[in-house]
């Protein structure tokens, strides 16, 4: 059973930065694909970014258009942790950010099997 625990959320002014982390335990599925999703108040949860293993030590990253060039997803396998560096934050980035794990290289929410509890990010103008 994979467990995912997010941290690093908080409140920041527009233009600021935050780094979210997702600590994984309880299995190796998270090493295939780990993604970040977010849910703003009154809106559906949406894909933000993912990092997928395509070879022994080769990974690819994928981002939602709304965060390309501002967010960077990375992983530290030695620490079993995935990061989301968020720069140039905008008020529309506000929401609860969840990390999730999948055995597939996918951005589709329904393909993710395990989810963390989420961490709140609030960006003020």
Image (cartoon, helix red, strand yellow):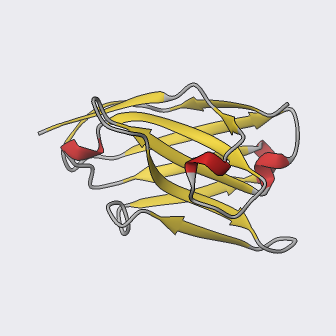
Residue at x-position 48% and y-position 60%: 72
Q: Position of residue 51 (x, y in %)?
A: 63, 61
Residue at x-position 77% and y-position 73%: 54
Furthest-front residue in this view? 110
Q: Position of residue 100 (x, y in %)?
A: 63, 42
Indicate the quadrant containing the N terminus: top left, top right, bottom left or bottom right: top right
Furthest-top residue in this view? 117
Residue at x-position 83% and y-position 74%: 55
Q: How many numbered marks are there?
A: 0
Q: Position of residue 111 (x, y in %)?
A: 67, 50
Specify whether 64 is left or right of 5. Answer: left
The residue nearer to you, when weighing 47 against 69, is 47
Specify whether 90 is left or right of 64. Answer: left
Indicate the quadrant containing the C terminus: top left, top right, bottom left or bottom right: top left
Instruction: Please identify the quarter of the rendering in which residue 12 is found.
Output: top left
Specify whether 106 is left or right of 123. Answer: right
Residue at x-position 67% and y-position 46%: 112
Q: Position of residue 63 (x, y in %)?
A: 47, 64
């Amino acid at each position: 059973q994979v467990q995912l625990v997010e941290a690093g959320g908080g409140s920041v002014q527009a233009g600021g930065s935050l780094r979210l982390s997702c600590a994984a335990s309880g299995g190796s599925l998270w090493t295939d694909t780990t993604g970040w999703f977010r849910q703003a108040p009154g809106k559906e949860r949406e894909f933000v970014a993912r990092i997928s293993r395509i070879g022994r030590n080769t990974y690819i990253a994928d981002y939602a258009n709304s965060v390309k060039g501002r967010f960077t997803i990375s992983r530290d396998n030695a620490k079993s942790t995935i990061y989301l560096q968020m720069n140039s934050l905008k008020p529309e980035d506000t929401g609860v950010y969840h990390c999730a794990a999948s055995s597939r290289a996918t951005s589709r929410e329904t393909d993710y099997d395990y989810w963390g509890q989420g961490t709140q990010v609030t960006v003020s103008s």
